[in-house]
Image: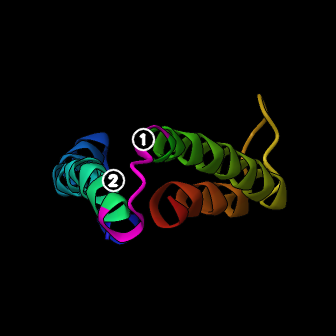
Amino acid sequence: MTFFVVDSSFAFVAFAALVFMGNSFINTLNSALISDTVEYGEWKTGIRAEGLICSSYPFWGEILQAVAGFISIIVLALVEYVPNAELSENTLFGIRNLIYIYS
């Protein structure tokens, strides 16, 4: 929605605040469900693998952050971004897509 509505920095911050409030609920729920996963795994297999489960959650988060950074670099290359140069309309449109739609 911000891709179509935002014309100023204030509007971007307002929309971002609303989005991150909703996103914080999902992140909290994901963290709370880790302990349920540990309990379910123990109930199902009889083995309590708490260390493996609790360490794999941040590991995969780091892997996904690296993949997101790689995809951002690819998109910037596709829209022909050149640092410290005048940006064309196509490049600005691609950067807006990267910020608002792909993320």
Q: Depth check: 68 or 6 in front?
A: 68
Which one is in front, 10 or 89? 10
In front of the other: 97 or 56? 56
Is the residue marked by circle 1 packed among few (<14), some (14-19), or many (20+) residues within 10 Å? some
Counting from the top left corner in percent of width and height, residue 76 is at: 75, 51
**Residue 16: percent from the left, percent from the top?**
27, 49
The answer to which quarter of the image holds residue 65 is top right
Residue at x 21%, y 50% (from the top left corner): 32
Give the vertical position of 34 relative to 1 (above or below): above
Q: Residue at x 38, y 60 (%)?
A: 46
Residue at 45 percent across and 60 percent down: it is: 100
Which image quarter: residue 15?
bottom left
Look at the numbered disc 2 and give the secondary structure of its residue.
helix
Mark 2 residue type: Val
Residue 44: % across, % down:
36, 70
Q: Which residue is mark 2?
A: 38
Residue 29: image quadrant is bottom left
Eye-nearest disc, 1 or 2: 2
* Magenta highlight on residue 69: no
